[in-house]
Amino acid sequence: MSSNSTLTNLKQAQSAERSDMDGLIKFILATLLAILPFWVQNMMSFGVLTIYLGIMTLASKIKPKTLLISATSYAIIVLIPYLFGLLMNTLIYSLSNNALFANQQGTYESFLRLFRLFIIWYVSILYFHSTPIKTVLGMLDKLLKPLKLLGVPVEDYLKVVMCVVIELKSMGVEVKNSLGESMRSVMGEGGRWFKINVKGIAQIIVSLIVDSFGKLEKIESFVEKVNPEELYYYCFKLSKRDVVVVLSFIMLVSLMWMIEIGYFV
């Protein structure tokens, strides 16, 4: 991939993102959404919040595959270790009757903790999958302006990050196809995994590592040629979509507040 074609793609993406929400407004709303579950206690409020997040998911047009991967990662990183620890704690308490291992929280409290953690996880997924990386880096560039005034090469660091992201996106399909062909060449007849050639897999790994060093030179050349303005940017813009989303969030908070004070009871 040449630097000229990369910059052309970036400009096309920039023009396509003008109708998207402002990155800063979206970040503030995402932060407030992550905090909301710690403020409410009523199950109806959690239900309203879940429906709202479902609507935001549909509006963000995030692929179901992305959501499935997110749910799987949450289960592996958070849910399974938490439930395993809870099970071990209960088992040790039942065997030793040690008060230190007594579970001080009921089922409802444990569910609330897991649900709140899931909301934080889910909102972060929605934000980063619906916000271009160049917008995130552009906001970081403006946020870290005091460091730039002190002489810290913030722009150089952000340029490297953006160039690496661009190269990874461009080589993703290539690596996937190459790896698939290489794996088929070292598998046994009929694709039976127990006949995989271990030596062949080792050669594939070495080949990928060697190719990655070649990519480093390309990234270094790319970083030297481009300007920060061509890679990332951020400019505050207030659109009708921003106003609609902010108003919907205000309505959400108002509805949850009325539920919490028992207005509908």
Image (cartoon, rainbow, N blue to C red):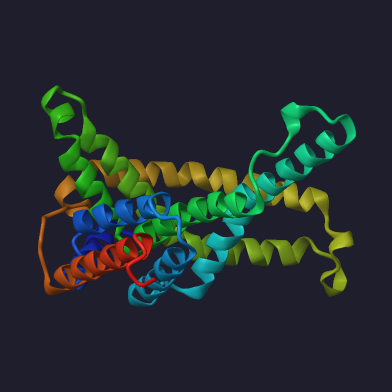
Question: Residue 245 location, x and y as percent?
Answer: 22, 69
| Foreground pick, 87 / 260 | 260
Q: Residue at x 58, y 55 (%)?
A: 73
Q: From this view, report whether residue 113 is shown above or below residue 256.
A: above
Q: Residue at x 60, y 48 (%)?
A: 78
Q: Is residue 52 left or right of residue 154?
A: right
Q: Is residue 227 visible?
A: no
Q: Residue at x 36, y 54 (%)?
A: 36
Q: Quadrant of the C terminus?
A: bottom left
Q: Quadrant of residue 18?
A: bottom left
| Foreground pick, 120 / 15 | 120
Question: Residue 161 location, x and y as percent?
Answer: 34, 43
Q: Is residue 92 left or right of residue 172?
A: right
Q: Quadrant of the N terminus?
A: bottom left
Q: Is residue 128 visible?
A: yes
Q: Residue at x 20, y 47 (%)?
A: 139
| Foreground pick, 129 / 256 | 256
Q: From this view, report whether residue 188 is shown above or below residue 144.
A: below
| Foreground pick, 51 / 102 | 102
Identify the residue at the far front of this view.
265
Question: Residue 93 location, x and y as percent?
Answer: 81, 35
Q: Is residue 158 left or right of residue 218?
A: left
Question: Residue 27 location, x and y as percent?
Answer: 27, 53
